[in-house]
Image: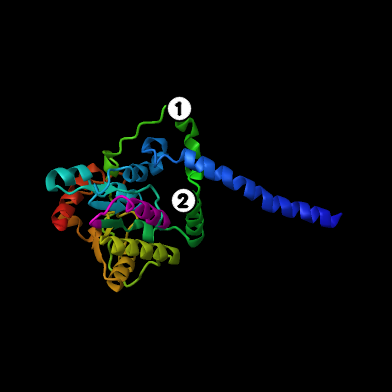
């Protein structure tokens, strides 16, 4: 009797996944909006990445990766109109290094950016190893089975509900609110270095490899963010850049040169810049890229 129960449980353990696999594959093919060119059928968090992946081939000269700091780092419209540089922000709120890698890997299937900008907050934020490992697992699962990522939009995909319209602005998140930063000097020199997680270093290495294979330059950029950036984080990124022959541009050291006004250019008290700050950063990057 006991052996019979064991065999039954073993069969359930083996047979159920085998039956589930073709179902996941079928619905993943049916519900993946990217090949259909329908970025409006994904969640708001993934919309900018999805929109970038549906752009005409070889139409993106500068690709920007990163979390919410990257979403307001520069204005692609302004960069194009004033400098003739085509760009796209391939970012997500809370984007992890594994998500950045997968986004770039998918982007270069149709694009050949001359420059890839990685906003560095995703390397030195407060995510712990356990959360990052969970994120890595989720990203890998979504990669193999897109239905796991996009299943929440099944009504829109079946035409039962009108998709919510999202303005993409080539990945730029247009934010006009003004909440001043009043915390004073935040870049106090120190010898301390923030630890970059091993998993983050692994995906950063993979991003570097893609850039090398595609002939793209990789530029590390830290956006002005007094609420979540400091000199210990600067030291960690600077050390990595120096050891790997990368260019690192820390805009937190250049706030006076940028002309940042903490009373007018911050969106939320020092975490992100608003559109005023974005325009100043864009002008600086425009000259830097030239």
- In the rendered image, which quarter is residue 20 located in? top right
- Earlier-in-chain disc, 1 versus 2: 2
Q: Is residue 32 visible?
A: yes
Depth check, front residue: 187 or 99: 99
| Tag 1 residue | 159
Q: Relative to 160, is 233 on the left or the right?
A: left
Where residue 42 sits in the image (x, y, percent)?
42, 39
Q: Relative to 238, is 122 on the left or the right?
A: right
Q: Relative to 34, is 265 on the left or the right?
A: left
Disc 1 and disc 2: Cα gap in Å?
24 Å
Q: Secondary structure at mark 2?
A: helix
Q: Is residue 264 visible?
A: no
Q: How many residues crowd around disc 1 within 10 Å: few (fewer than 14), some, or many (20 or more)?
A: few
Q: Which mark is residue 143?
A: 2
Residue at the right extreme? 1
Where residue 110 sits in the image (x, y, percent)?
31, 50
Q: Secondary structure at mark 1?
A: loop
Rendered-image quadrant of the C terminus: bottom left
What is the magenta range? 98-115
Residue at 39% over, 43% down: 46
How is the model colour-coded?
rainbow
Residue at 14% over, 47% down: 84
């Amino acid at each position: 009797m006991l052996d019979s129960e064991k065999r039954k449980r073993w069969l359930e353990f083996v047979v159920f996944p085998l039956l589930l696999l073709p179902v996941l594959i079928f619905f993943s093919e049916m519900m993946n909006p990217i090949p259909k060119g329908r970025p409006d059928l994904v969640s708001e968090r993934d919309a900018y990445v999805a929109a970038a992946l549906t752009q005409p081939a070889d139409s993106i000269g500068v690709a920007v990766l990163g979390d919410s700091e990257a979403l307001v780092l520069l204005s692609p419209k302004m960069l194009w109109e004033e400098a003739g540089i085509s760009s796209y922000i391939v970012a997500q709120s809370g984007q992890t290094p594994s998500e950045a890698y997968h986004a770039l890997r998918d982007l270069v299937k149709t694009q050949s950016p001359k420059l890839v900008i990685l906003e560095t907050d995703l390397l030195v934020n407060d995510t712990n190893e356990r959360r990052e490992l969970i994120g890595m697992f989720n990203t890998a699962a979504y990669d193999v089975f897109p239905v796991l990522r996009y299943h929440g939009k099944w009504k829109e995909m079946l035409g039962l509900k009108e998709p919510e319209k999202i303005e993409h602005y080539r990945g730029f998140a247009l934010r006009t609110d003004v909440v001043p930063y009043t915390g004073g000097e935040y870049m106090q020199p120190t010898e301390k270095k923030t630890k970059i997680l091993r998993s983050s270093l692994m995906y950063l290495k993979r991003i570097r490899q893609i850039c090398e294979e595609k002939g793209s330059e990789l530029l590390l950029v830290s956006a002005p963010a007094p609420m979540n950036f400091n000199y210990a984080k600067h030291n960690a990124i600077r050390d990595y850049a120096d050891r790997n022959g990368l260019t690192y541009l820390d805009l937190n050291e250049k706030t006076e040169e940028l002309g940042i006004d903490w009373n007018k250019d911050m969106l939320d008290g020092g975490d992100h810049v608003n559109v005023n700050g974005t325009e100043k950063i864009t002008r600086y990057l425009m000259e830097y890229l030239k």
